[in-house]
Image (cartoon, rainbow, N blue to C red):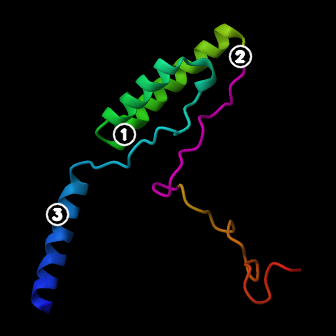
Amino acid sequence: MNHRYLTSVAAALLLAGTAFAQQGDLPPVPDDAPIYGSQIMTPEERAEHRIRMRSARTLEEREQVRSEHHKLMVERARERGVTLPEEPPMRGGMGLGGGMAPGGGMGQRGGMGPGGGGR
């Protein structure tokens, strides 16, 4: 293929990706994403919560949905005499801080390659 053609395609994809990201593109909310207080929610309530999360257009809107939901679940747990963790579950995925923290890797010689794993 022509180098100029490839450069043009790459530039177009880069510009399209940048424009798409600027429109508030958010990572998807998976069906198995943890929901704070899910043990005291009906399946319909869990589905509704996921719909609300998916309907949010910005990260700030998602945080607002999470915050409101957290308050509701704390109140419901108190009324029912149920103990929930203080904080909502950590958000999964590799985006927005969901990756491995410093020191969380296998470390020096911790892999299964030569010299690793069999101490």
Amino acid identity at mark 2: Val
49 shown above or below 107: above
**Residue 94 at x, y = what percent?**
50, 58
Image quadrant occupied by the C terminus? bottom right
Instruction: Point out the stretch of residues depicted in magenta.
Output: 82-97
Q: Quadrant of residue 38?
A: top right
Identify the residue position indicated by label 3 in the image.
16
Element type at mark 3? helix
Q: Count residues near mark 3 (Cα–Cα under 10 Å), then give few for <14, some for 14-19, many for 20+.
A: few
Residue lying farthest to the front in this orientation: 1
Amino acid identity at mark 3: Ala
Identify the residue position indicated by label 1 in the image.
60
Residue 95, magenta (yes or no): yes
**Residue beneath the point at 37% across and 28% down:** 52
**Residue 21 at x, y = what percent?**
25, 56
Identify the residue position indicated by label 2 in the image.
82
Element type at mark 2? loop
Q: Report whether 44 appears left or right of 7.
A: right
**Residue beneath the point at 60% across and 20% down:** 74
Element type at mark 1? helix
In the rendered structure, are the residues bearing label 3 and label 1 in contact, judged by CB atoms less than 8 Å apart?
A: no
